[in-house]
Image: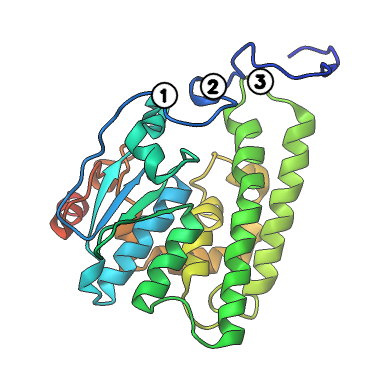
Amino acid sequence: MTNETYVPPKVWTWDKNSGGKFANINRPISGATHDHELPIGEHPFQLYSLATPNGVKATIMLEELLHAGVADAQYNGYIVNIQEGEQFGNDFVAINPNSKIPALLDRSGDTPIRVFESGAILVHLAEKFGHFLPTDTAQRAEVMSWLMWQMGSAPFLGGGFGHFYAYAPEKYEYPINRYAMEVKRQLDVLDKQLANNTYIAGDQYTIADIAIWPWYGVLVQGHLYEAAEFLDVSSYKNVLRWANAVGKREAVKRGRIVNRVWGEENERLKDRNSASDIDEVLAK
């Protein structure tokens, strides 16, 4: 690690890779880099994703809907290898011009509808099927507030803390301390909210829980960035209680393994085309 102080140039230019685990796919421009045809299955919903926290939101939501008896929520879940730059293929960019997973193609009607950004996918599916988003004005506002909280807060956990703690080519004290402090503040926000609520937005399980669990629930369970001890996650008792309860849900167990290609054999499913695909993996 250099001790030299960085002096920013007057105009930043992209003249070298940023370093770190994802250096090969980071770039300051958008758009497709190559032609790549996405598969299309038989079901009404085509999900193109990866089992990162954001991707897991979408698969948990779809599995929750199916578990609730919504047969029309059947989906094909195809993996997008972001390490290989598949998110920059022309078909994927046509669904999500921001080149981030997950991306959903809703083919249930006469005209396909593209939906990108994980929060938008949750709202789209909740409104379409009338599940996991209350219709009462006050309750809906509470759920939407926590959903937006997650969308605005998680980049500090992932792109901030996660990057500098786990993925950056060198360890730097200032950014790690800066983002660790913010992540612990966020955990404290959740812990106080869950002190008096069964779920994030009250007594009902909603898309707020589905959005927040893959990030903060998995974090306090010790499965994110190998940072559990560093962040003293066990001290957030209410978050841990909630995280364990959500993690025991059947749909969560199913959704978290879809488009996952790492971990134990019984938690990896590259592509999902039917419920039996998940059944076979979980039975291993």
- The disc, 2 or 3, on the residue closer to the chain's N-terminal end is 2
Of the residues shown, which amino acid type is indicated by label 3? Glu
Cα distance between the residues tagged 2 and 1: 16 Å
Of the residues shown, which amino acid type is indicated by label 1? Thr
**x and y, in percent, of residue 215 in the image:** 53, 53
Relative to residue 237, is residue 253 drawn left or right? left
- The disc, 3 or 1, on the residue closer to the chain's N-terminal end is 1
Kindly identify the residue that appears in the image at 41 percent across and 24 percent down: 33
Cα distance between the residues tagged 3 and 1: 29 Å
Q: Are marks 2 and 3 in contact (CB under 8 Å)?
A: no
Of the residues shown, which amino acid type is indicated by label 2? Ala
Kindly identify the residue that appears in the image at 49 percent across and 82 percent down: 134
Question: What residue did someone put label 2 on?
Answer: 23
Relative to residue 198, is residue 273 drawn left or right? left
**149, 193: nearer the viewer:** 149
Kindly identify the residue that appears in the image at 38 percent across and 41 percent down: 94
For label 1, the SS is: loop
Disc 1: CA contacts within 10 A as few (<14), some (14-19) or many (>=20): few
Q: What colour scheme has been applied to the protein in the rendered image?
A: rainbow
Question: What residue did someone put label 3 on?
Answer: 170
Question: What residue did someone put label 1 on?
Answer: 33
Kindly identify the residue that appears in the image at 66 percent across and 67 percent down: 191
Looking at the rendered image, the disc whose residue lies closer to the viewer, 2 or 1, is: 1
**x and y, in percent, of residue 143 in the image:** 57, 74
Cα distance between the residues tagged 2 and 3: 13 Å
The image quarter containing residue 82 is top left
Q: Quadrant of the N terminus?
A: top right
Whether residue 231 appears in this view of the structure is yes
For label 3, the SS is: loop
- The disc, 2 or 1, on the residue closer to the chain's N-terminal end is 2
The image quarter containing residue 151 is bottom right
Q: Is residue 133 above or below residue 49?
A: below
